[in-house]
Image (spheres, rainbow, N blue to C red):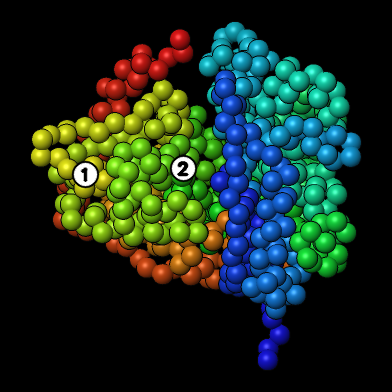
Amino acid sequence: MAATAPQVFAIDLGTSALKAALVAADGTVTGWAERSLPLRVLPGGGAEQDPATWWAALGAVAADLGRAHPDQMRAVATVCASTQGEGTIAVDAAGEPLTPCISWLDMRGAPHLRRQFRGFPAYQGMSVRRIARWLRLTGGMPSPTGKDPAAHMLFVRDELPQVYARTAAFLNVLDWINLRLTGRTVATVDSILTSWVTDNRRPGDIRYSPALVADCGIDADKLPPIVACTEVLGPLTPAAAAHLGLPESVQVVAGAIDTTAAAIGAGTTGDRQAHLYLGTSSWIAAHVPGKKTDVLAGIASVPCAIGDRYLMTALQATAGANLTWLRDKIVEYDDPLLGAGHVSRDEGSIFDAFDMIIPTVPAGANGVLYTPWLYGERAPVDDANLRAGFFNISLDTNRSDLLRAVFEGVALNTRWLASAVDRFLGTPVTSLAITGGGALSDSWCQIFADVLGVQIRRDAQPLAVNARGAGWIGAVGAGRLDFAGIPELMRTDRVFTPTPQHRATYDEIFAVYRDLHQRLAPVYRRLNRPR
């Protein structure tokens, strides 16, 4: 019997679940285990998770994999993680959490951010002079919503001063996992990004900017050392090895946050090779050779796992979330759609149900149009006031029309985003890899091909993209693979091509979609301004 190839124990820590897989250097994903995770939503815009539940879930999924795939577990040589980003955990000198994880959804730091960075003239409450410096050095700027570590840390400083005094380091989600695995306190080039304190002008030399650190309001010694995503941090600690059921000799590679890992897991490691991630939110991303920011479209290229490259990411606030909303808030109590897809391991079931309905409705949803801005929008416009809506409903409209309109609305918004991406890349994207849970829907993949007018190549295992990305980053860090060889390892299960007879329909609908945004944006500002 042939020996089992060396495996990476790949961690995929999202907001709703922790997943783990065993990944070989050729991209083969063997085994899959997961545990759901709770999220506490608090008054005043708070959202938190308990890191201890992550660690307990990690031990549970490791035990599951050990029982189901003992040979592959014995072949594990490397551990590497992909995690949600923009979370913040204050830890003490012993590495123990002093706070829950302040989630990427948490907005409590917004007023503290405005106070720290105010000035005249100002944009969204922050000094234009400071914004110009952030853009020049980092490629971006703090979110005015307060949903990133720059604001989270200020919230702890101002609202929890005793905790702040005891804080030895502020860690992102990935950084905390690596601390528990190895005992080392570090940040990666991508996990540190949204603290907005780094000079990112040289991709192979991401470092703290003294000026940005001095201005951020946080003591410099509370910011961890920065390492590359492919750096070997060292072996598992004895406690971590026992928790995972792995030898202490297993090495830990630093890993990446989810957007970075997905760009590797999608097989799009070459310059300007784009992929569309379709999950609760969605994004188009591509590796590029240079640092660049499109301020108007909200698109930037930022540090990533490939040491001499940047990753352009254009983020849409809600994609699959529109389908979850439709299922959970619109359908009736006895509807068969209600029971479909409630846990991520059954995520395909919701799309199986939808795929039976979508083909019965013609392109254009019998005239119904949907705007998918349930939670505002990030790109190609950054506007937290935008909201979703159905348009052109009549007495003849039925639920099937509404459903197809939702699928089409997300694709129309992606077409709007794609035009900004084409300008950013300097070349039109004609073929797009698609991955993430939404790619399980044949109907949605075909709608994307038709609306965007491009070839859509579907990932053969779209739910595994982040774990596969962590596996490949771990394999590169361990010296068993290089990034240039990844595209030829990627497996596509189907290619969707545009339907020519639908082009005119979607061109006309897209023009109306853009017109609706222009006309409605002022209305949404009036309806949703703070009171």
Which image quarter holds the C terminus?
top left
Task: Residue at 31% x, 38% y: name it.
Answer: 330
Give the number of the mark in front: 1 or 2.
1
Vertical side of 293 occupied by 18: above or below: below
Residue 162 picture quarter: top right
* Disc nearer the start of the sequence (1/2): 2
Q: Which residue is mark 1?
A: 399
> Label 2 amino acid?
Ser
Question: Hey, what amino acid is under mark 1?
Answer: Arg
Outermost bottom residue:
1
**Residue 47 shows in the view:** yes
Horizontal side of 336 relative to 302 (left or right) equals left
x and y percentages locating residue 385 in the rendered image: 41, 22
Are the residues tagged 1 and 2 within 8 Å (C-beta)? no
Tell me the distance, in whole angstroms, between the alpha carbons under discs 1 and 2: 23 Å
Q: Nearer the viewer, residue 309 or 162?
A: 162
- The residue sitting at 72% across, 57% down in the picture is 59
Instruction: From the viewer's side, name the closer residue of 91 and 145.
Output: 91
SS state under label 1: helix
Q: Position of residue 216 (x, y in %)?
A: 73, 22
Q: Which residue is mark 2?
A: 281
Q: Nearer the viewer, residue 334 or 129?
A: 334
Against 1, residue 334 (above or below) is above
Measured as percent of width and height from the top left, residue 14 is found at 59, 48
The tag on residue 23 is none
Examine the image and state in which quarter residue 477 appears.
bottom right
The residue at the point 70 percent across, 65 percent down is 63
In the visual, does 410 lie left or right of 310? left
Locate residue 213, reporting x and y percent.
76, 26
| Residue at 46% across, 33% down | 378
Q: Decide if residue 396 is on the left or right side of residue 129.
A: left
Label 2: element kind:
loop
